[in-house]
Amino acid sequence: MPTQAAGIIGTGRALPERVLTNAELEKLVDTSDDWIVSRTGIRERRVAAPDETTSHFAALAAQRALDAAGVSPRELDLVICATVCPDMMLPSTACLVQSKLGAKRAAAYDLVAACSGFVYGLATARAFIEAGHARYILVIGAELLSRFVDYTDRATCVIFGDGAGAAVVGPVAAGRGILAHRILSDGDYAELLYTPGGGARHPASAATVQQRLHYIKMRGNELFKVAVRSMAETVGQVLDELRLAPSDVDLFVPHQANQRITDAVADRLGIGSERIYANIERMGNTSSASIPIALDECVAAGRIKSGDLLVFASFGAGVTWGALALRW
Ligand code: UT7
């Protein structure tokens, strides 16, 4: 037993107002509402306005999470912003959020684990708090994927959406909060989902722009299989560690990558649809933001009660994956 348990004590979300529907995408690329709905479960996604930034949504979601937790920005020890859509290469989006919030005592850094960023961030926050190195930590997942999606590539542009979600992680009573987690990676699969341009390997140039290297490239079908296998396996490992079974899970909140991935993972685990939260129909895949947005919707809808066992599972570029169980 850790000396100090760590749990989620407040959540928040912030979304762009603009809704991009499948019908609009039908006009941009050779696709159909039927294909998108049947292959992904997505009907619409949010897209930021040109003057909106990742840090804007991140800070808004974060402030809402702080308000819900009753924690002031000055009480924060650490701001972790999980994102693959930073406002700039330098400095971190977390520092921009730290400034917007006025979190004067906090360290701040970005965490790059793609769609697994929020689970990775919770695992990190847990470690800091249990070890006594921090009391309150903000974990944010924030993405403006519309800025990095190629709207001429039907394999990716129909999937991704924009948004942010946040959680304040802080001390909770023993036996509550984060009970177990497992986070993993396999860089052998790096090129299944990546953005080649703009880094040290292919610095921005007229040629990289012309070759469209600054856009997300994805081999979706290959990712799909790895995602289902790894998410189901890791949830099983986390439950085994706690000597619990899938039947003990009150609410399963997976990364919203594809409704078919969620269904396949749930099927392997034997978790019925009444215990799974899905909002992909309205949000698309918002990468690191998907779990905290979904979680905040569950909180707002009164879907979670004290003592419930929640399980998160994620999978994303890297590849990275993970699962985390917590007692609400
Ligand atoms: O967020 C975490 C990381 N991401 C993921 O985990 C994504 C995982 N992968 C997926 O969600 C799915 O693989 C996709 C939704 C991306 C694709 O679905 P799929 O069932 O795996 O389709 P596919 O890639 O095997 O493509 C099947 C066909 C192809 O046509 P042909 O070669 O059979 O003629 C594609 O060109 O569907 C075509 N296709 C489309 N057709 C209409 C691909 N995208 C589209 C589209 N509209 N938007």
Image (spheres, rainbow, N blue to C red):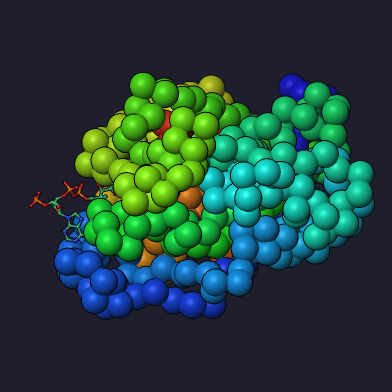
Location of residue 324 with respect to 59 vertically, above or below: above
Name the residue rendered at 77%, 29% in the picture.
128
| Residue 123 visible in the current orientation | yes
**239 left or right of 172?**
left
Say above or below: 328 vs 24: above
Q: In the visual, does 321 lie left or right of 64?
A: left
Q: Residue visible at 47% across and 69% down?
A: 47
Residue 203 position in % (x across, y down)? 49, 38
Rendering quarter of residue 80 = top right
Residue 287: percent from left, percent from top: 47, 50
Residue placed most toward the observer, 169 or 31: 31
Looking at the picture, how far across and down is residue 102, in whole percent?
88, 57
The quarter of the image holding the N terminus is: top right
Q: Is residue 308 above or below residue 245?
A: below
Position of residue 40 relative to residue 288, above or below, is below
Asked if residue 310 shows in the view, the reply is no
- What residue is at 46 percent from the left and 25 percent from the top? 185
Give the image location of residue 148, x and y in percent.
44, 54
Q: How many marks?
A: 0
Quarter-wise, where is residue 213 in the image?
Answer: top left
Say which quarter of the image contains residue 157.
bottom left
**Residue 289 placement, left or right of 107:** left
